[in-house]
Amino acid sequence: MQSSLFWLIVISIIWLVSIKPKEKEIIQKEPIPPKSITSTSKNIIDVAKENLGKPYVYGKEGPDSFDCSGFVYAMHKELGIQLPRTSLNQSKIKGEKIPKNLLKEGDLVFFDTAKEGHVNHSGIYLGEGKFIHATSGKAYSVTISSLEAWYKDKFKWGKRLNANK
């Protein structure tokens, strides 16, 4: 009887350890205290700007090159915030869809650059109508772009992480 109980406990522990979080949810490893909320959005922007000019490479999430969602994913991972890996799944995280005029620094921003009716590009809002992202466009690197230029009619919505509220 004790042997069966032992194996039941071992199997249960292995099963619990192997469970992976749902990709569609944001998982913050530790709750962020209220005092640091403002600094978190500043931190994500500081970390992101350190990567300006690094090349765009499809499927990469750093540290030397990025694709768009890999850039957003890696910048948040560096601060201990887990996000889904793709732009489409990042756009489906919990929370309200934020219109362009209500964006705050550190918000995630999503685009339909192919105009196909679904999100295929993501970035991090910097404030003053600008965002940072890894682009396969003209710059072909991590760069800062305006929401009011080429991306104006491709913007879908923003999302605010709990850390940035």
Image (spheres, grey):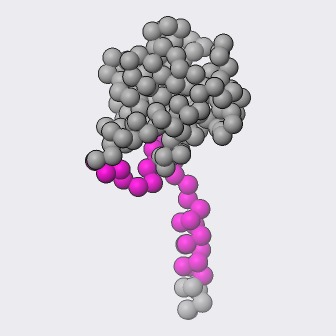
Q: Is residue 33 magenta?
A: yes
Q: Is residue 58 visible?
A: no
Q: Is residue 150 magenta?
A: no
Say above or below: 31 vs 59.
Answer: below
Q: Tell me the residue at 48%/35% (across/down).
A: 46
Q: Is residue 77 visible?
A: yes
Work out whether residue 114 or residue 42 is closer to the camera in this orientation and state it: 42
Identify the residue at the far left of this view. 34
Q: Quadrant of residue 160?
A: top left
Q: Which residues are magenta?
A: 7-34
Q: Tell me the residue at 55%/92% (across/down).
A: 2
For the image, the number of numbered tags is 0
29 on left or right of 140: left
23 on left or right of 125: right
Locate residue 137, reporting x and y percent.
65, 15
Say above or below: 103 vs 116.
Answer: below
Identify the residue at the far bottom of this view. 1
Q: Quadrant of the image for the C terminus?
A: top left
Q: Tell me the residue at 49%/7% (across/down).
A: 149
Locate residue 55, reporting x and y percent.
69, 27
Q: Tell me the residue at 66%/29% (across/down).
A: 54
Q: Quadrant of the image for the N terminus?
A: bottom right
Locate residue 124, reporting x and y percent.
48, 28
Locate residue 22, reporting x and y percent.
51, 48
Work out whether residue 56 or residue 21 is closer to the camera in this orientation and state it: 56
